[in-house]
Amino acid sequence: MNQLLSGEYECKPDLKGRLVLPAKVKANLPEASGNQLVLVRGFEPCLVLYPRAAWRVIHEKVMALDEFNEEYRQFQRNFFRGMTEVELDSIGRFMLPRTMLRYAGIEREAIIVGLGNRCEIWDPTRYDDFLIKDQQSFSKLAQKFLTTETGPPGPPAA
């Protein structure tokens, strides 16, 4: 069964750069991943935290690219840059390397956002900058991505 990582959680890194994974997120980690997580740089200025099982699927896709193709190698190099395996300690903390904290601009506060198979870790101000502010634009995206191609549902079957 797929676990769903969801919610927004405000947290503060400690002086050593550790974050406590929110209990609700930790409870939804797949058992197969245990306390093993993978931390990577996001495409936006954030960090992405994957349960090991979810990361394995993505890792296999990226590694399946032809290593003799320059564009694929360049993508692999950048995609895996700074990838770090992290482990939750007994109270659910994990270490955020300083280079990763700098990349995401995280200093005193962070927000962890559950996105199904992964969590993003943001500086709260940067996170707000990447959210859609106009509800009409958000509504149009919902229509574009969530409306089925077959049109509206018909009357219920008798």
Image (tube, rainbow, N blue to C red):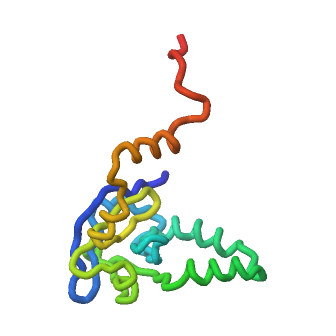
**Identity of the residue furthest to the top in this view:** 158
**Identity of the residue furthest to the right in this view:** 68
Residue 98, percent across and down? 35, 89
Residue 50, percent across and down? 45, 69
- Which quadrant holds residue 47? bottom left
Is residue 93 found left or right of 60 in the rendered image? left
- Which quadrant holds residue 15? bottom left
Residue 56, percent across and down? 57, 70
- Count of number-bearing discs: 0
- Which quadrant holds residue 51? bottom left
Seen in the picture, residue 94 relative to 16 is either above or below; the reply is above
Is residue 119 found left or right of 80 in the rendered image? left
Front residue of this view, candidates 49 and 71? 71
User: Going 29% across and 59% down the picture, which residue do you hit?
Assistant: 8
User: Going 43% across and 74% down the picture, which residue do you hit?
Assistant: 37
Residue 91, percent across and down? 25, 75
User: Going 53% across and 26% down the picture, which residue do you hit?
Assistant: 152
Seen in the picture, residue 28 relative to 37 is either above or below; the reply is above
Front residue of this view, candidates 129 and 34? 129
